Amino acid sequence: MEYIVYEQKGQYAVITISREKALNALNSQVLAELDQTLDAVNLDEVRCLILTGAGAKSFVAGADIGEMSNLTKAEGEAFGKKGNDVFRKLETLPIPVIAAVNGFALGGGCEIAMSCDFRICSDNAVFGQPEVGLGITPGFGGTQRLARLVGPGMAKQMIFTARNIKADEAYRIGLVNAVYPQEELLPAAEKMAAGIAKNAPIAVRNCKKAINEGLDLDMDKAVELEEKLFGDCFESYDQREGMAAFLEKRKVEAFLNK
Ligand code: CAA
């Protein structure tokens, strides 16, 4: 792979988008490599992922403007689908994905971060959807996920004005969960990933599914989905061990993902 670095560290792994000379902008090759990387994650071993960008300046500065500049309407739509398909794969991956946003997260960069389960960022991070200043709409899910994450009013303001926001404002509006000094960002993400990986994997996966899929359902159907996923945890080794450990006043030996 030319633009993606994948590093498994025990029970979690770090995916780094590494096209630093273009501030990690997403061209078709980066998207294709990311797609292959997601397909290759060993879900028997890896229980949490971190997504970040190479270098100290940028997470992802958007979709590649050079590649998009002369597209036809049909090609533009197809490019949008290419990004959306990969981002949807990321969003629906069975295991949690933490976006560690280490700088510019603009356009497709903000959109890929929003396809992760949650976001933490460095204090130099900048978020925004600058597309209308380029004559296009956000095309990798920004109109949909930003509105769901920060509410339609704030999403519309950000998208219509194309105004970038800094880390503290992203935190204030709930786009990121926490802000760290740059050098502490990845260690914090790794600590979180390791903490998630220690919990019962089937339960964590079912929580992700319940939240993601439940948000698209009415409450009656949503709680029904929760009941099924709750029930699905029972009879697992990890459920028996987790509860036995509590009752026997001891620590869980290990969750075995079974
Ligand atoms: N596409 C292609 N190349 C990009 C890029 C992008 N989105 N963002 C940065 N680059 C390239 C620059 O062209 C430059 O390359 P050269 O050295 O070959 O000239 C290199 O990265 C460094 O960038 P700058 O010199 O511009 O760095 P800077 O520090 O002056 O500015 C920046 C940084 C503010 C992030 C600026 O690069 C910028 O505004 N980038 C574009 C951000 C943007 O508009 N993103 C949205 C794209 S549209 C989109 O994403 C659509 C969608 O929803 C699918």
Image: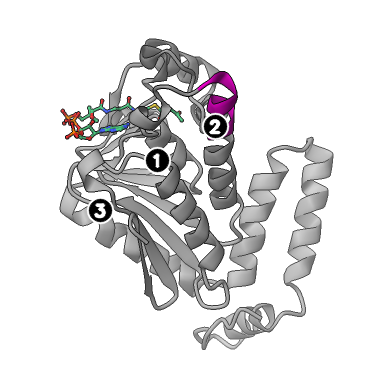
- Specify the segment rendered in magenta: 72-79
Left or right: 201 in relation to 16:
right
Q: Amino acid at mark 1?
A: Asn
Neighbours of disc 2 within 10 Å: few (<14), some (14-19), many (20+): some
Is-magenta flag for residue 76?
A: yes
Q: Answer with mark 2 or mark 3, whichever residue precedes in sequence.
A: 2
Question: How far apart in space, not on screen, are marks 1 and 3 (Cα)?
Answer: 26 Å
Is-magenta flag for residue 152?
A: no
Q: Which mark is residue 88?
A: none
SS under mark 1: loop
| Residue for badge 1 | 27
Q: Amino acid at mark 2?
A: Gly
Q: Answer with mark 1 or mark 3, whichever residue precedes in sequence.
A: 1
- Compared to residue 258, the image places residue 71 above or below, namely above
Spot occupied by residue 80 in the image (x, y as percentages of width and height): 54, 32
Foreground pick, 171 / 34: 34
Q: Is mark 2 within 8 Å of ligand 1?
A: yes
Residue ID at (66%, 81%): 258
Residue ID at (59%, 51%): 89
| Residue for badge 3 | 185
- In which quadrant of this rendering is ligand 1 seen? top left
| Residue for badge 2 | 80
Q: Amino acid at mark 3?
A: Leu
State which quadrant residue 9 falls in: bottom left
- The scheme the figure's colours follow is one colour
State which quadrant residue 125 falls in: top left
